[in-house]
Image (cartoon, rainbow, N blue to C red):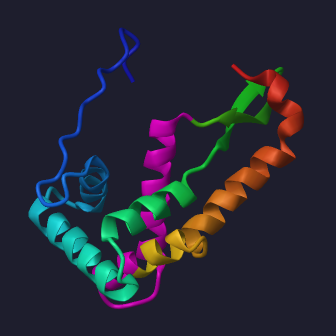
């Protein structure tokens, strides 16, 4: 990380089909080895499957899932006097969205099943219903922050 100055925030352009920045962010995180067209194919087919299974607008289901997974607090390690404390900190909205996308994708990839499309579809539907591995991860982070509330005085 450079010590000279803060990196400029890059503006992500929305995707062409749904005109959503959140979909673009998901595509960029699904993408591996620079294969963006394959990532778009996976995400768009996932949205089609969500529409079939839930009979709702897939964008609303996706946004609801991300909203449910988004953490409010997280813990960060802070060294004070030779010992490391887990200090709870509030999460800003952009970081919360990024964490939610990462957790949903990790949970989808660890899911059993054949295709990435079906795994991602099922994880997003579960997250919108407040179940699934990504929600479990969010609850775990919240529990850690609650347990270490005594160290909140070491905030930086």
Viewed as shown, does residue 3 lie left or right of 128? left
Near-viewer residue (49 or 82): 49
**Image x and y of residue 44, in percent:** 20, 71
Q: How many marks?
A: 0
Farthest residue to the bottom: give it.
114
**Relative image position of residue 104 (x, y in whole percent):** 46, 64
Give the residue furthest to the top.
4
Position in image of residue 141 (x %, y %):
68, 53
Outermost residue on the right side: it is 150
Q: Is residue 20 left or right of residue 154?
A: left
Q: Quadrant of the C terminus?
A: top right
| Residue 78 belongs to magenta span | no
In this picture, residue 54 sits left or right of residue 10: right
Residue 82 visible (yes or no): no
Q: Residue at x 79, y 34 (%)?
A: 85
Residue at 25% across, 53% down: 28
Res 114 quadrant in image: bottom left
Q: Main secondary structure of the magenta part?
A: helix
Position in image of residue 109 (x %, y %) = 41, 74
Q: Determine if residue 94 is in view.
A: yes
At 62% across and 62% down in the image, what residue appears? 137
Q: Residue at x 37, y 78 (%)?
A: 121
Q: Which residues are magenta?
A: 92-121
Query: Is residue 89 toward the left or the right of residue 21 in the image?
Result: right
Q: Can residue 95 be found in the magenta stretch?
A: yes
Given residues 96 and 156, the one toward you in this image is 96
């Amino acid at each position: 990380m450079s010590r000279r100055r803060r990196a400029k925030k890059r503006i992500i352009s929305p995707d062409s089909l749904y005109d959503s920045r959140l979909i673009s962010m998901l595509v960029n995180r699904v993408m591996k080895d620079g294969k963006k067209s394959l990532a778009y194919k996976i995400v768009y087919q996932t949205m089609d499957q969500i529409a079939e299974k839930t009979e709702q607008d897939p964008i609303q289901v996706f946004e609801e899932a991300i909203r449910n997974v988004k953490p409010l607090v997280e813990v960060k390690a802070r060294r004070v006097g030779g010992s490391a404390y887990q200090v709870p900190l509030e999460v800003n909205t952009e970081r919360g969205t990024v964490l939610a996308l990462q957790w949903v994708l990790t949970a989808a990839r660890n899911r059993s099943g054949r295709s990435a499309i079906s795994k991602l579809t099922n994880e997003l539907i579960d997250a919108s219903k407040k179940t699934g591995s990504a929600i479990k991860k969010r609850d775990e982070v919240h529990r850690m922050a609650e347990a270490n509330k005594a160290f909140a005085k070491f905030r930086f």
